[in-house]
Amino acid sequence: MTALHWKLVIDANDPHAQAVFWSETLGYEVEDNSALIAQLLDAGAVPEAATLDFRGRRAWRDLIAVRHPDDPYDEASGTGLGRRILFQRVPETKSGKNRLHLDVHTEAGRRDDEVTRLEARGATVARHVKEPGGEWVIMTDPEGNEFCVH
């Protein structure tokens, strides 16, 4: 069996703000799809209303992704071909606990510093966990999605 390519998709009210938060949290790059978008606009395949200006370049209004800076990407579309997270706009706000979440691993002894850095960026500490198997901090991103800092 061939390994499958995948991406994590997260529903968001403001996908661009989420992309900024997570790119800065993980050290990822926000994908630049402007060349593909320009091509599709020029061909009349998508309406201008499906796009917006994001950081001085054309981006999709309702979708944006972040990718690991070391992973390959398609230069024609800007789409990452490795580790990536796609944020898609949805009308409803988050309700209930996530069934899937990210674990962010810090360097040894740096967890508290990382928690402080993320709080300054808009994350919130939900609780500290200490169990025989380890210690971590459960946090929420600016839209309330849970993630753990180890």
Image (spheres, rainbow, N blue to C red):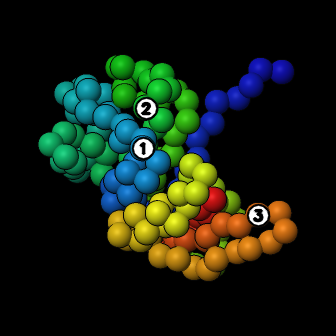
Local secondary structure at mark 3: strand
Q: Of the residues under marks 1 and 3, which one precedes in the sequence?
A: 1
| Between marks 3 and 2 in the image, the one whose residue lies nearer the viewer | 3
Q: What residue does disc 2 label?
A: 69
Give the class, few, some or many, for how many residues have Cα within 10 Å of label 2's Cα (few <14, many ≥20).
some
Disc 2 residue type (three-letter): Pro
**In this image, 100 relative to 71: left or right?**
right
Residue sitting at the far front: 109
Q: Quadrant of residue 56?
A: top left
Give the percent coordinates (x, y) of residue 4: 70, 29
For mark 3, what is the residue?
134
102, above or below 142, in the image: above
Residue type of the residue flagged with mark 1: Gly
Q: Are marks 3 and 2 in contact (CB under 8 Å)?
A: no
Q: CA distance from mark 1 to mark 3?
A: 25 Å
Q: Do labels 1 and 2 touch, CB within 8 Å?
A: yes
Q: Which mark is on residue 27?
A: 1
Left or right of 142, for residue 32: left
- Please tell me whether residue 84 is drawn above or below residue 61 in the rendered image: above
